[in-house]
Image: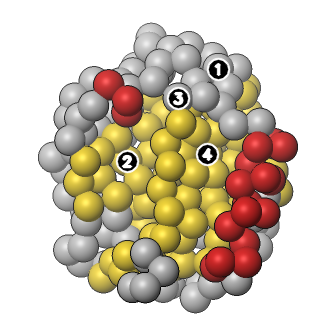
């Protein structure tokens, strides 16, 4: 639309991104988004690599999930917060951030820290590329329903002050 917002239809809308070294951080990571959920319970905002093999930010049933895969773990590491506790409402834009500074994973919603957990170890980042609006890489499923207005991937863990600054800069544009 005229605000640069992409509509996703729950069934086939996706934006794929070719693999790039800029999407392969190993020691820190932040996925920042501005999204408006339509009520579908399983919505992938962003995922790098095939499902559950690298890193992602998504909605699953009643939760917001920030998932990463680290060297030596043998499986993915999940941090989640319920949408209810994070005050996420369908049909309203929200600034959702998953951040990992090399030692702690955090989920922020609308500038407020909602969940955190200790996590160390380098991220696994390989090919394939990423996807906005569904499972990543070559996998399909969990299509997003609603609008995704912004996706940023950083090779650093944003601090609470940086997350809040970004939220404050975006909130009036999207009525958050």
Sequence order check: which comes first, mark 1 or mark 2?
2
Which of 165/38 is in front?
165
Residue at image point 49% right, 34% down: 68
Element under disc 4 = strand
Q: Which of label 1 and label 3 is nearer to you?
A: 3
- Compute the Cα span from label 4 to label 1: 13 Å
Report which residue position mark 1 lands on.
Answer: 102
Residue at image point 29% right, 52% down: 131
Report which residue position mark 3 lands on.
Answer: 155
Sequence order check: which comes first, mark 1 or mark 3?
1
Which of 145/173 is in front?
173
- Compute the Cα span from label 1 to label 2: 19 Å
- Compute the Cα span from label 1 to label 3: 11 Å
Q: Check residue 47 in the rendering and tell me which mark sits there, or answer none.
A: 2
Residue at image point 64% right, 39% down: 99
- Compute the Cα span from label 3 to label 4: 12 Å
Q: Are the residues flagged by discs 4 and 1 in contact, CB closer than 8 Å?
A: no
Which of 107/166 is in front?
166
């Amino acid at each position: 639309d005229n605000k640069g917002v992409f509509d996703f239809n729950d069934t086939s809308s996706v934006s794929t991104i070719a693999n790039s070294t800029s999407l392969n951080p190993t020691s820190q990571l932040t996925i920042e988004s501005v999204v408006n959920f339509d009520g579908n319970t399983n919505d992938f905002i962003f995922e790098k690599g095939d499902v559950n093999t690298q890193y992602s930010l998504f909605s699953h049933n009643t939760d917001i999930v920030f998932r990463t895969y680290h060297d030596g773990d043998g499986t993915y590491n999940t941090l989640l917060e319920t949408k209810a506790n994070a005050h996420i409402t369908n049909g309203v834009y929200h600034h959702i951030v998953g951040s990992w500074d090399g030692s702690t994973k955090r989920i922020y919603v609308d500038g407020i820290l909602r969940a955190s957990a200790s996590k160390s170890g380098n991220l696994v980042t390989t090919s394939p590329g990423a996807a906005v609006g569904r499972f990543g890489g070559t996998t399909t499923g969990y299509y997003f329903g609603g609008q995704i207005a912004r996706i940023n991937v950083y090779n650093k863990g944003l601090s609470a002050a940086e997350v809040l600054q970004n939220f404050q800069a975006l909130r009036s544009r999207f009525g958050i």
